[in-house]
Image (cartoon, rainbow, N blue to C red):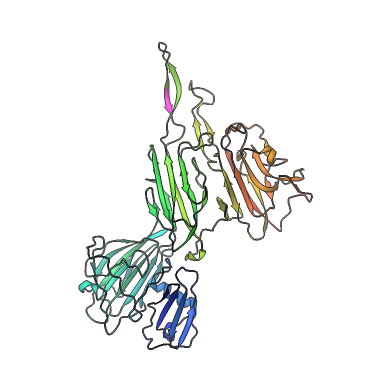
Amino acid sequence: MLDLETMKVQHVRSEDSEGSSMLDLEMVKGIGKSDLEMCLTLPASPGYRKLQVWGQSSQVLESEALVQWYTNMRGIVNQHQRLDTHDPYHGPAPPQPQNDSPDTTHQAKRSTAQPVITTEPPPHVPNCGAVLEGSVAGAGVITTPGYPDQYHHDLYCVWVILGGKGKRVRLSFDDFEVTQTPDCTGDYLIVSETGGANDTSVVPMCGTDVPGEFVSEGDAIYVEFRSTPHGDTCRGFSARYSIEEVVVTCGQEVSFLEFDFESPGYPAPTKNETSHCELTISHDCEVPICQLRLDLLEFELQPPEFGNCDQDQFMVRANEPVPVLCGNNSGQHLYVEVGGRASTSLHILQSPILPKPVGHITDPITGHSTPLEWKYEIPDARRWKIRVNQIPCDCSYDHLKTATPRAPTGCLQYHVGVRETVSSFNFQGSKLDWDPCWNGNETDCGRRRWTGHLNGLDYHVCVRAMEGYCGIMYTPTGPESFLLTGRTDSNITEHRENLYGSKGCQSDYVVVAKSRTPGDNDPWSHDRFCGSALGNYVQGPIVSYSTPFYMQVKTDADEFSRSLDLGNRGFQLEYTQLPCSGPYLFNSDQKFSG
């Protein structure tokens, strides 16, 4: 363990490309100039280059422990903020207010000047406080030492409340009594909603007016309390904190690393009207962001018409084209490349759901026909809840070790398990078909049909190969879980034809490199698969030993030009990674045909 008092470290200098500055890490009992200098390199954090430590001990300094101690006490566990210049002999002074106008949000007395430096300086290293992890306790109380009794002199307390990834911190005061001095130049309390010790926007508070509520801008709040060596003391304060999920909706701009994007009024359906919902995701330049992962926890829009999203649309404006989505996509996810962008926007466009005429009656005199009734093909249940994860280019920024894995370049979807399920967009989408209902009693009138896969797609579904696994097998999850080309109907159980190869699959198909169905008599492996069943020479699962593991999904621009493709639901396949020690499922004379 690192014994800072034994070392009698006096102060620390930060050195970077813009020069050096003194920091506030001075030990109380460290006196005089040091004869020891050591350079410490901080782990991957922008703005940090080198630390020079002076002390009176020849004991070897442990860089990781020193850095962790400093980081915890200064409230930059989350932020990795650039450290500003402080007085090297009297510790960090509270920042100057930006103006003298009253603040109605936080009502305690604010200062207009820095605290007076006395001949007997207050402590420069926190001697009370704590780092509070939201993942351990979702709520709690912080108080001055000894509360509700009077606090002591010479206190320097620092609390850093960490909400955790995708969460914010809310702080409210139940009691507040800090010795009143002009401009709070004596005892004072500061609260930084940015979570950093060097927040220049905060001002000290003292007196008896209870401050208003504080809500973190990111996922941390920094609280600092100081008392002078002499003078009167008071009861102090008692404050409650709570950790809450970050939820945003239309028209907002957000910079959290993780949050939920919900439709207005969620979980209630959106209004049945024309609307445009936009969300702006800001990428913090201090923490470079390379990718977004969008998990569509619940996603229900109007379905496509013959594969086209003509009514509702979900669009992402990013570095590379992202498919326009509609229909039912709950459970799907997307990776979006955003490296180098200042922000990325999500857009959801909605059109009114209109009913269809069912049955007609003809006026015997005029000959005009009017509908008997109007019915909706889909329920008015459009809503969405999308979990957004901003993935840093450097994983070292994830202080809670809950990083969402980065996807390889070119992968719209990325799976990391040994066995998972992949499906085409809108695979679960269906509707009541009221189109063939002129009389209202036709056989197909009101039949539930699949609304089908989407047109114009070309993307990759990637799978991370686990250690010790050399192959991958894709298996349909049911009798109607591979319907890509041809005329199919969800209520017809006639023989389904599997097609494969570049000759048989030219419109809508999936590509799995050098694949074949185990146990068939075809000595050739193939890569394209389509039709109304999976397989090459025979129907069944397909296996590939080609790495990296990926599946390409390709659909053409419509359902009519290359072939008449109606009622095609798409695909839902369960993949299973095959261990290298397992049996080899191909014959020794395997060949490949594109």
498 or 412, which is in the foreground?
412
> Which residue is located at x 52 percent, y 45 percent?
323
- Quadrant into which the C terminus falls: top right
47 left or right of 88 in image: right
Q: Is residue 373 magenta?
A: yes
Query: Looking at the picture, how far across and down is residue 222, in whole percent?
Result: 35, 68
- Residue 588 drawn above or below residue 226: above
Q: How many marks?
A: 0
> Which residue is located at x 22 percent, y 70 percent?
207
Q: Is residue 267 visible?
A: no
Q: Is residue 304 magenta?
A: no
Query: Looking at the picture, how far across and down is residue 13, in whole percent?
Result: 42, 79
Query: Looking at the picture, how far across and down is residue 372, in whole percent?
Result: 42, 22
- Residue 75 drawn above or below residue 261: below
Please state the extent of the stretch shown in magenta in the rendering: 372-377
- Residue 389 drawn above or below residue 359: below
561 or 568, which is in the foreground?
561
Q: Is residue 46 visible?
A: yes
